[in-house]
Amino acid sequence: MTTKRPYSALIDQLKTAGLRPTRQRLALAKLLFEGGNRHFTAEQLHAEAMGAEVRVSLATVYNTLHQFNDAGLLREVVVEAGRSYFDTNMDDHHHFYMEGSGELQDVDCDEVVLTALPDAPEGMKVSRVDVIIRLNPAND
Amino acid sequence: MTTKRPYSALIDQLKTAGLRPTRQRLALAKLLFEGGNRHFTAEQLHAEAMGAEVRVSLATVYNTLHQFNDAGLLREVVVEAGRSYFDTNMDDHHHFYMEGSGELQDVDCDEVVLTALPDAPEGMKVSRVDVIIRLNPAND
DNA sequence: CAAACCGTTTAGAATAGTTCTAGAAAGAAT
DNA sequence: ATTCTTTCTAGAACTATTCTAAACGGTTTG
C-alpha cells in the first residue's frame, strides 16, 4: 500500500503548477480529484468542504478554482450567465446542459464530430471550441 | 414614402408576440432591428438608449430583452460567466468569442459542420446546440 | 369621451455570485 | 528561530440582474 504518503501525487501536481501545497489546496484537490469526474459550482464545493472536515473560506475556494483552472487541473464551463461551473474532466469533450435543473453532463468528444471549422480571424488563434447541447424535458 | 406608419412592421411583430407596442418597446426594437445584426449586453443597450432620444430604465431594458428573447425576436448567448450577451441574428449560426476584448462575432452555420450528435438522454429533447469558438491573440 | 382596467414602466432596494482588502496565519528560506 | 513571502480569512465591496410597490399609459367599455 502507499498510505504512507497519501497525497504525494497531488502535492507534485500542485508544485509543478507553481502552487504551494497548502492544507486548503490539498483538501480541495482531494475532494475534487478523488473519485470520478465532477461538475460543480464554487458555492457547491464550498458547502461540500464545510460539510466535510475541511474549513475553507469561500474566497479561498474561488481563488483555488481559478488557480487550478489556470494550471490546467480543471476547467471552467460557461453555460449560464451568472453562475460558473467547473469540470474536473480534462479530456477533450463537450456537454449536455439541462436547462431546467441546471445539470451538466459530459459528452464524449467522439460523439460530436466537427468536420469543418472556420479559420480564426487574422492575428487570432483558437484556444478552445465548446459545444453545448441544451436540453429540455420532452413532452411526448 | 411610408413615413406615415413608420414602425407598423415592428408593431405587428410585438402584437403577434403578445406584447403591447409601448413607447419603450418600440424604441428599443427600433434601436435593435434597424441596421444589421448586433451583439450587445443589457447595459450597453441601456447606455445607447440614454445616449439617443430614448428614456428607459435599466429594468425595462432587461424586461424587454427577456420578452424579446422569449418571443424569438432575439437570442441570448452565454459566453462568459457574469455577463449576458444578446444577439439579434436569429439565423442558425455560431460564434467566435475574443476572450481578451469580450467581443462576439457570428460564424455562419455552414462554416461549422456537425456530422454527429449524440442522442438526447431519455425524456429530453435538444433545444439548441451552441458552438463557441474561443479566440486569443496569436503571438507568432 | 370618461372611467375603469390591467399590463407596463420606474426608481430604488434587494439579491446572487464573485472579487477585493487588510490583517492574520503558515509555508519556505536563511 | 527568525525573517520573508505567499496564502488564507472574514467581511466589505462590487457587478450584473431581479424584485418591489407605486405611478403610468394603452385599451376597452359604457
Image (tube, coloured by chain):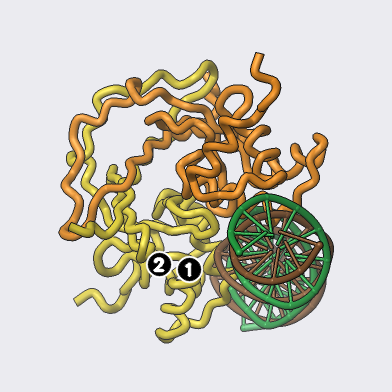
Chain colours: A orange, B yellow, C green, D brown
* SS assignment at label 1: helix
Q: In the figure, residue C3 lies in which quadrant? A: bottom right
Give the labeled residue for mark 2: B29
Tag count in the figure? Answer: 2
Q: State the quadrant of the N terminus of chain A.
A: top right
The residue at the point 71 percent across, 44 percent down is A23
The residue at the point 59 percent across, 37 percent down is A11
Q: Is residue C6 above or below residue A100?
A: below
The residue at the point 23 percent across, 41 percent down is B109
Q: Is residue B37 above or below residue B57?
A: above
* SS assignment at label 2: helix
Report in which chain the residue with disc 2 lies.
B
Q: Is residue B97 in view from this perspective?
A: yes
The residue at the point 54 percent across, 32 percent down is A104
For the residues bearing labels 1 and 2, Cβ distance under 8 angstroms: yes
Give the labeled residue for mark 1: B25
